[in-house]
Amino acid sequence: MDHKKIETAVKMILEAIGEDPEREGLLDTPKRVARMYEEVFQGLNQDPSEHFQTIFGEDHEELVLVKDIPFYSMCEHHLVPFFGKAHIAYIPKGGKVTGLSKLARAVEAVARRPQLQERITSTIAESLRDSLAPHGVMVIIEAEHMCMTMRGVKKSGSKTITSAVRGIFENDQAARAEVMSLIKS
């Protein structure tokens, strides 16, 4: 991260909107924004598949679901936050399971970059599919986008839901229904 470049850009934005970047309350704002950007965009150089390298041998070929994984990201179109919950389901194959926390870590790695919700959803699904080769993967993300809440149409509380289904979940309606009912419970 180039902190100096971010600080210069933030100072210019403050000037462009008619603010005085030298005013007491704004003096350290460019530095604070640079530090915040380093934190919220730390996933830029992370590969979510790294988190699926820890594989355990377990004789289990039934559904694994981790739901309600909280996340936040930044809309790449407006650079404002969106936030919500991710639900990740997979059916292991050949005894290959990963640690439950690894699913949450993958969400973090993908979300912490300028992003689109649709891309987060498919990237997590494909990373899990490619790393574990399970019978199936299903990722559902529900989020509120500040670009719809605080600007434009101003519809507070509206949620966007995206899904990515791979493998058995593509054609097996009963398997899909099971995941959906467990997410809703």
Image (cartoon, rainbow, N blue to C red):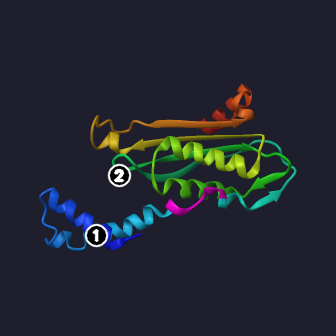
Q: Earlier in the sequence, mark 2 or mark 1?
A: 1
The residue lying toward the viewer, choosing from 48 and 81, is 48
| Residue 83 locus on image (x, y percent) | 44, 49
Look at mark 1 in the image and give the residue it sits on. 7
Residue drawn at point x = 27 percent, y = 42 percent: 151
Picture quadrant of residue 158: top left
| Residue 90 locus on image (x, y percent) | 72, 43
- Badge 1, how many Cα within 10 Å: few under 14, some, many 20+? some
The residue lying toward the viewer, choosing from 58 and 123, is 123
User: Which mark is drawn over residue 112?
Assistant: none
Lateral position of residue 52 relative to residue 114, left or right: right
Q: Does any portion of residue 153 appear in the rendered image? A: yes
| Residue 182 locus on image (x, y percent) | 66, 37
Look at mark 2 in the image and give the residue it sits on. 79
Which secondary structure class fits the magenta region best?
Answer: helix
| Magenta highlight range | 44-49
| Residue 35 locus on image (x, y percent) | 37, 70
Lateral position of residue 100 relative to residue 37, left or right: right
Image quarter (top left, top right, bottom left or bottom right) of the N terminus: bottom left
Lateral position of residue 17 relative to residue 164, left or right: left
Vertically, is 141 above or below 173? below
